[in-house]
Each structure stands twice: as C-alpha cells, then as structure tokens.
Image (cartoon, rainbow, N blue to C red):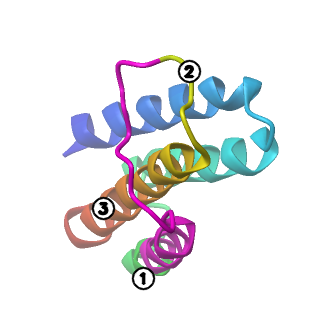
Amino acid sequence: MKLFKILFGILFVIFAYLQLNDPDSGIWIGVYSFAALACFMSIRELWPSWVFYVLAAGYVVAAVLQWPPEFEGVFFGETAMRSLNIELARESLGLGLCALVMVVLGKWG
C-alpha cells in the first residue's frame, strides 16, 4: 500500500506540473497538489480516514459538475484540442481519478 501512495503522490505532482500552461492553471495545480498532499499524508497516517472520504466526495461532485454537455472523447494521442468538450472530459476524468484514489486511501490507507 505504501508503494501505491508514493506512486499516486508522485503522479499527482506530475499532473500539477503539467497544468502550468493551462489558462486556469491555478485551479488545477491546487486540485492535483492537494491530492498529492493527501497521498503523502496518508503514508505517515496523519489524517483520519473520514478526511479522505470527504475529499473523495468533493472530487466526485466536481467531476460531475465538470462533465461536458456533450462527450466527444479525450483523444490522448492528439496535441491540439478540437473542442472545449474534450478539455472538460479530461478534467472530469482527472477529478474522478483523484476521487478514486481518495476512496482507496480512506478504506485501505
């Protein structure tokens, strides 16, 4: 489990770094940095499990609100955005991943 926490903590730090060129980078750097912090805090068991469940709920709500009006895919292979719906879908899936990791940390962390 410790490897899971370290792996996702580093992954979320990388995600935060990759947001630097985004127009709304401040929001997304905060989102992924806080997920990374949660992973690293769980290594030392500094937060109770309910904190991770609250974070998971927040990430789920944000993911639902961020979901695009029309899903057009995520197109991982393309560098250029075809539409705002693709960007919204990517952001929503990122929030969903954060939520999933928070549930794992709450249950088995």
Q: Residue at x 44, y 74 (%)?
A: 60
Q: Which residue occupies the foreground of this view, 87 or 34?
A: 87
Mark 2 or mark 3, which is nearer the start of the sequence? 2
- 49 lies left or right of 32: left
> In the image, what residue occupies the spot 25% across and 62% down?
104
Mark 3 is surrounded, within 10 Å at the Cα level, by few (under 14), some (14 to 19) or many (20 or more) other residues, namely some
Which residue position holds label 1? 50
Q: Which of 36 and 65 is in front in this view?
A: 65
The residue at 66%/31% (across/down) is 19
- Which-is-in-front pick, marks 2 and 1? 2
The amino acid pointed to by label 1 is Trp
Q: Marks 1 and 3, Cα distance to the nearest angstrom?
A: 14 Å
* Mark pair 2, 1: CA separation: 40 Å
Q: Give the range drawn in magenta.
A: 55-78
x then y, percent, for residue 31? 63, 53
Element under disc 1 = helix
- What residue is shown with label 2? 80
